[in-house]
Structures are given as structure tokens and as C-alpha cells.
Amino acid sequence: MADWAAAAKIVDTEAANNFANKKLPLISIEWLKNVHGQSLSGLSPRAAEFRKIPVLGPNVFASSALTIDKAAGVQSIKYQSALHPGTPLVTFTPTQCLEDRDVAFNQLFWEQYKNNRMIKSDQWPALPENSSFTAADGTQRTCGFIRYAAAEEVEPQLQRWVNFVNRTTRTWGSLEPENDPIVVAMHAQRWFVSIHPFEDGNGRVSRFAMEWLLKSVGLPAPVIEDMNNDMYMTEGMWARELGIGIRRAIVELESCSRDLSQPGCQPIASK
């Protein structure tokens, strides 16, 4: 069985049971570690282990610089530090593009980059938040880097995340707007990526968690054109994107129900 398929089977089986029983069980950090371990089995020696190193997401090349809207999306992430109240869990720092740095800095960057290390943020000169340049396609862009939750935040943040999911799903059937399944799934997925608890596979596990929530209430996994936009949109925009993706998935399911021979309609065989 493919590495991701083992985790997918866990999620699909549990979600089907949840939907049949009209009840979501409590989840735990160990549940997350199990899904991560299954999804990366054979691919990573550190599957199911929390990271011990800081994580920076570099967008420091002019060719991959964020549009102003995407940078604003990162800056709109509202999750707060569990250890330092009032401090954002995720930050985006605008900086000079690598192409504008001197030769010595470029050499240092590539030496660290090839060894899976990132230059510390204080080695990059800070720029005003409105610093940007006009790219060849006419869009306004800015270079910078995303700093995810500190390594020491991982476990306390994940416990907060688990508490949020368990508390919210206990009242899933209520009419409170904040318990809209799509909004809850959006928060769970986006918050998990912001924590970035593992060295690898965080996006994958965030999608499994989102699918577990949605499928547990009878909704399909959304068909999204680019899941990487989860960090680059505001909450409202990302929730709408998930809603569009769910409607797209429903259309595809209806089409497959009429003709299973269509590409993508064949079920995945499990071993």
C-alpha cells in the first residue's frame, strides 16, 4: 500500500464510522502522530516525531516573491503563541531579494540551503512592510520569509489545536455560525500548517485532518486547484475556496456515478 494510502484508509474508515454514528470521537496528539507516521512510512526516518528545529519558509527570490495579496494573507493569520501571549504564531518578514544581496551573502545562503538550513532572519536587513517591486507580469510583489511556530511551541500548540477540534465537534449539530463544518475544517487545516509540527509532511497531514472533519459530516474532500494557497489567503477567502472545492467534488462524484470509466473515477484498490 502506498505510504499516503495507509493514512487515507485510516481517515476514510474513521470518518465513515463517525458519519454512520452521527458522532465524532475525541482525537488526541497521538492520533495525529499515527496519521503522520502512516503517511510517511518508509519515506522519513523521523515519521511521527516532532521537529526540534526552527522552520522558515523562504520566498527570497524575485522569481518566487509573494504578491502583495499573498503576503497580506500570511500576515492575516491570527493564531497566537501559547508561550508568549499576544505574539503571532506565524509572521511574514519582508526583506531584500536574494538577487539584490552581495556575492558573499549568496554563497552563505546556498551553503546553508543545500544542508537543509536557513539563514537566521536577523541576517536579512528588515524592510518597511510596504516595500515591494513591480514584477515582469505587472504585479506588485515582495520578497521575504515566513516564520512558523517555534519548535518549543509545537506540543502546547498541538494541544490547543486538539482541544479546539474536540470542543467544537461536541456541539457540531448546533446552529452557531462558528460551527459551520467548512469554517471549522478551514481553521483546523490552516492552524495545523501554521504550527508545522513535523519536519516533513505537514501539508499532507493538515489535509487528512480537514478531510476527517468534512467526511465525518458527509461532505467530500474538496478539489482544490492549489492547496499551497492555505497560507496566502485570508480566512474568509480560504473558507470560500474550500466551499468551491467541495461543490467541485460533488459535481465530479455525480459525473462518476453516471460513468465509472471516466479518468479519475476508478476507485483505488486497497491491499
Image (cartoon, grey):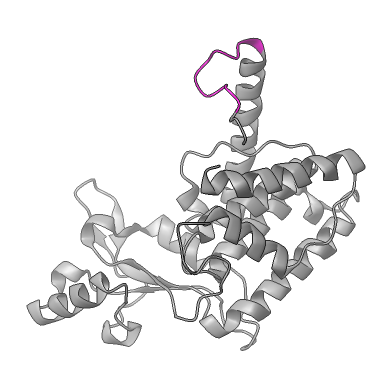
**On the rendered structure, is 73 left or right of 87?**
left
Farthest residue toward the left? 103
Picture coordinates of residue 269 (x, y %)? 60, 30
**What x and y, as percent, mark residue 144?**
33, 70
| 260 magenta-colored | yes
| Of 18 and 61, the residue lying toward us | 18
Task: Using the image as rendered, state which of residue 265 and residue 96 is in the foreground.
Answer: 265
Magenta residues (range): 258-267
Nearest the eye: 179 or 203: 203
In the displayed structure, would residue 104 be above or below residue 92? below
Location of the C terminus (image quadrant): top right
Q: Nearer the viewer, residue 2 or 22?
A: 2
Q: Is residue 223 found inside the magenta-colored segment of the image?
A: no
Can the viewer see residue 108? Answer: yes
Q: Is residue 239 visible?
A: no
Task: Look at the image and tell me in which quarter the N terminus lies.
Answer: top right
Q: Position of residue 213 (x, y in %)?
A: 74, 49
Residue drawn at (22%, 60%), measured in percent from left and top? 62
Vertical order, 38 against 15 (above or below): below
Q: What is the quadrant of residue 96 in the picture? A: bottom left
